[in-house]
Image: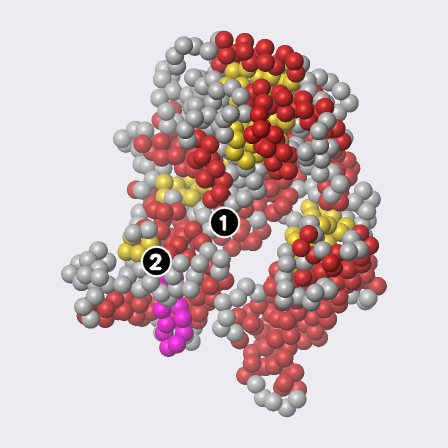
Amino acid sequence: MTDSPPWADLFGHPEPYPEQADGIDAAVDAAADGGFLALEGACGTGKTMLALTAGLDRVRDPDSDFERVFVLTSVKQQLRQFETDLRTVNENLPSDYDPVSGLTLVGKADVCPYARENRGGIDRENVYERCEGLRERTRNLVGDGGATTTSNLVSEARSQQVGLMDSGSGAADAPGAENAPDVDYLSVDGEPTPYRPDTEEYDDVEFCPFYAGFLDDLPEDGEPAEAVPFDVTELGHVDADELVRLAAGHGSCPHSIMGALVPEVEVVIGNYYHAFDPVTTGTFTGALLDDSTFVVCDEAHMLEPRVRDLVSDAVADASLRDAENELTRVVQPLSFESAGAESDDAALVRGELEDADVTVEEIEAVREFYADLRGELDRRVTAYLDRERPDWRASMRKLDDDEIPLRDPEEPGEDAITEWADGEGYGERVWARAEQVGAVVKRVLDTLEEEDKQRAAPGVGRTLNAWYREGHTDFFRAIELERTFDEAEPPDSWRRAYNGGLALHNCLPSEPIGDRLAEFGGGVLMSATLEPMDLFREVTGLDHLAERGRPVVERTYGLSFPTENRASLAVDAPKFTHQNRGAPGEENPTRLAHLDATTAVARRDGNVLVGTPSYAEATWMAESLSERLDKPVLLDESSGDRETESLKDDFFAGDGKVLVTSLRGTLTEGVDYRGDRLSAAVVCGVPIINTARPQTRAVITAYDRRFDSGFETALTVPAVRKARQAVGRVIRGPDERGVRVLLDARYARDSWNAVREYLPKHEREEYQPVSPDMLEVALDRFESRRPTSR
């Protein structure tokens, strides 16, 4: 490059697109002043490399205060893209540059050696409870007054292998066992570890040898990073598999090693939980939340809804029950003592309560409150079902999820549970002390009991404290009913059909988003769909930051690839609203028009993605297309990652197919349909969520009070972004060709509920309105421009 910019050596490719160069410069300049870049870039713009390069420029600049890049994304596919691009950066660094160190954050289930191999009574379902119990017992064995030392525990675990080797069994590839075949070592993904396949015991106390190994490597007065058994600065990026291989092979806990590395590497890749979930930041990633961190929020159009969920809270009926039982177990030893029985447990309880400044009377008051609260929950749910579904006892297996508002969603005011509690004499003292009581109950039970168990009381206490503390305009309270079936519950109880609980919804997360972003030194918030930018800035708190002197700059980049390679059509079909289309399967002009238009696109060569407003509509569309088309039609249903990945593999393999999904699913965002994987995408309707839900109406009301139009801000704009994400999958490179169809009159022309104005200017110019009867003509015209070779 001529007159190369300072960041050129950190850019992983020979030369950036013009948009990339401009975006990198904008991000670097903004961060230098403690600010942020809000970036919309079409698929294929190279946003991942843009953001990494800008952040690494700040980290490697000796005059900068930045020490790391913290990447947040809500889509696993994008997480993998950041890993790939970081490796590309390292592969192309000048020879005199040190490699960029990086780390991907994952959960315990992904790195625990036992959980990965389903050994030691640990699997992906129970790994968190078992891990905490094993760690607690390991610490108790080696802590003050403990029975032994970490060195002894590690030696004990390793010596089991010596005994096996002496007995004639061994494994030639196991650590220290070169001449001892067939030793029964635990191997993780083929990597041998120094320990047996099961957890160990010391004096009949079960412990985790990997965690003991980590504790043994910890210097007495040093930093946790000194316990890391490898030099991360020489390895470049370390993903979950490499971390497990390096840590478990050494005999140390991979999850603990990951935590030790968090503040040490130059690039940390995680998800929104790692920055916005209070529990995760409080226990794991808090070291990243300061002004030496350059933050990258990828898929930032999802920032608001994802953080809304993270800063909302709930307490389940079962958790209330468990918390009540935990409080009972804490006060029981004192009850026995008052009856004349001496007890060491009672002395322990009294000591913990004195240290925490919590009285027995407070615990008993909170316990009584929880019992009465469960009774009130039971009364309200039963009355609601009797009123709304009189036959619910006879049709429990057919019930759907439900929500019972505790106030009028459109009239902010005190909720019914708070009113009930006040009427019963449960005032501020009980609500406010619930959190402190929960914390001391956990400490007592963790000492008294040996079980691997998550304690309910701390979480219940925190949530109920917030329930009483938070306001009633920005927060909405409800009873949520999640469909289940538990035959252990009485046949006439709603608990047989539902998991119920109290939900505290944060309707307006802009303040917590802005406050958290303010903790970072600067960064990039980016997506293929941020426009309208003024609304994005409002709902994510960026305007609040700008008012406090933190600069916020904007960039919007459309597709720079040849326009002749794509057909972008806004079809003026009848509005695909619930009122117009009726129930799935109903035959009417609206459904027929959308089916005809979708068929016209889907019958063309290649793979075609069809997005509908819901999974129910996707089922109808897939069944209808199957009757009309010769090519295979695949249906995406609400399912887990494994099923989704299998469906993608089927779609990509072989000749052209049609894949029908919900626009609120996972296949229309973040998925890389590169090359010939996708020839066309059709969006049917505007995927606005169900406005009948009380929570949705409460969100609209909260936005109405903060912004000019709650419905458009909270629902319409996010729905249009979903549609744009789907059609954006088609064109990702300069040589790719494809058809992008927005199918609904609201995209094609102005009307009272049109959404065309929410497309950025360059897309409004490109998506020219087409009448349904001219769609085939437009498709034929595009195909006639197809080059004879690619």
Q: Which mark is residue 252?
A: 2
Q: Is residue 585 above or below residue 606?
A: below
Quarter the N terminus occupies? top left
Circle 1 packing at 10 Å, graded few (<14), some (14-19), many (20+), is: many
Is 211 placed left or right of 426 in the picture?
A: left
Q: Is residue 130 above or below residue 328?
A: above
Q: Which residues are magenta?
A: 200-220
Instruction: Give the percent coordinates (x, y) of residue 63.
Output: 43, 33
Q: Is residue 662 above or below residue 320?
A: above
Instruction: Give the percent coordinates (x, y) of residue 576.
Output: 70, 27
Classify residue 116 by image quadrant.
bottom left
Label 1 residue SS: helix
Q: Is residue 30 at all visible to an observer of this figure?
A: no
Instruction: Give the percent coordinates (x, y) of residue 753.
Output: 75, 25
Classify residue 440 by image quadrant.
bottom right
Residue at x-position 69% and y-position 70%? 367
Residue type of the residue flagged with mark 1 = Thr
Residue type of the residue flagged with mark 2 = Ser
Q: Which mark is residue 285?
A: 1
